[in-house]
Every structure is written in C-alpha cells, then in structure tokens.
Amino acid sequence: LTGYAEQGQYSPRGLEAVWPVYRDREPRLPTGLAQALYTKFINLPPLDRASALPLVLAFSDFDDSKEAWERYDPVSFRDLCVKLGVSRRCYEEAFEPMILTGLFAPGAECSAAAALGMAYFFVLRSQESFDVRWCRGNIGEKIFRPWVEHLEG
C-alpha cells in the first residue's frame, strides 16, 4: 500500500475540497471539529461553511437507536439540511458530493438517518478512519487472490 494520502472531493464543477491526512495534523482536534477546520474547501466561503453548524445538533442527536431512526428516517437528508438552514451552496458543494459517494444516491432520495449514520461511520467515529491508503497494483492480484488462497489453505 501507499502511504496515507489526501483525498479530493469533487462536484460536477470540479475539485471542491481536499481532506487531509488527519493522523498527521497537529494539534489533534476532536473528530468533527478537525474535519471542519482542517478540510480545505476550495470554493466554499466561510459564511456558507458556518451554515452547516446546526447539523452538529443532528449528529449529536442521532445515536443509531431505534428511536433515532424513527425520528430521522422519514425526512430526506436534503430536507433536514434545508430545515436546519444549511446554505444551498454548502449543501451542493460539500454535502451532496459526500452523500453521492457514500450512499450512491442524491441527498433528496436518502433518509436523514441513512446519511447521519453513514457520516458517523465513515467520518465522525474516528478522524483517522477517514485517512486512506491506496493499493499499488491490481487489487484482485495484490489483496483478494492472496486472501482467497489463505482462506482455502
């Protein structure tokens, strides 16, 4: 595998954000705060980024319980963002690409519960969970074939 690498987040307009290698950042900030402060948003103005702050309440409230799913599943992630005052630009440049990547559907078609759960699992549970390494070579040959051989052996 390669070393850890920054990741780019793209929209139809091009590169929107660069996610750093969190394990290399100092000072170490709490998960969520680190993503907000260390992510390099290429085009998104600070006021639009600040409009996402009310989502912190939803992330804090969503604990993956049956009750949380009952509260957040009936509403789309897009509608939750509108209700909480996330700017249209922030939604389109930061959150929509994330939802498309993580849930393979637009935020208007994903429940807020699914989006909050995905964000917690991939981004918020541990900031280092979002650090990536890439396979050098064909994944089938380098990872899956040896794994299958090991399981069969």
Image (tube, rainbow, N blue to C red):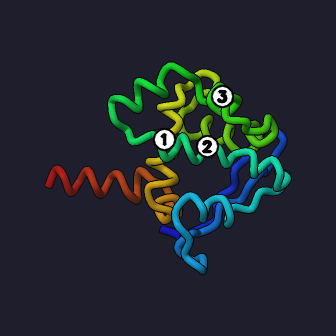
Query: How would you rate the neighbour count of disc 3 (Cα within 10 Å): few for under 14, some for 14-19, many for 20 or more?
Result: many
Residue assigned mark 3: 78
Q: Quick one: SS at disc 2? A: helix
List x then y, in percent, for residue 52. Answer: 69, 45
Residue that carries the numbered disc 2 in the rendered image:
55
- SS of the residue under disc 1: helix
Query: Distance from label 1 to label 3 (Cα)?
Result: 15 Å
Q: Quadrant of the C terminus?
A: bottom left
Residue occupying image coordinates x 77% and y 57%:
41
Amino acid marked by disc 1 = Met
Residue at point 37% right, 57% down?
Answer: 143
Q: Residue at x 54, y 30 (%)?
A: 112
* 1 or 3: mark nearer the eye: 3
Please tell me which of labels 3 and 2 falls first in the chain.
Answer: 2
Considering depth in this image, is 52 or 97 the residue closer to the camera? Answer: 52
At label 3, which amino acid type do we have?
Arg
User: As drawn, is 4 to the left or to the right of 126?
Assistant: right
- CB atoms of marks 1 and 3 within 8 Å: no
- Mark 1 residue crowding within 10 angstroms, few (<14) / some (14–19) / many (20+): some
Q: Are marks 1 and 2 in contact (CB under 8 Å)?
A: no
Pointer 2: residues within 10 angstroms few (<14), some, or many (20+)? some
In the image, residue 74 lies at what x, y percent? Answer: 50, 19
From where the camera sits, is residue 54 visible? yes
Please tell me whether mark 3 sits on a helix, a strand or a loop.
Answer: helix
| Nearer to me, 97 or 58 | 58
Report whether 151 appears left or right of 133: left
What's the distance in space between the residues labelled 1 and 2, CA to CA? 14 Å
What residue appears at the point 33 percent right and 29 percent down from the top-left corner?
A: 66
Q: Which residue is mark 1?
A: 118
Q: Which mark is residue 140?
A: none
Q: Look at discs 3 and 2 and give the one toward the viewer.
A: 2
* Circle 2: residue type: Leu
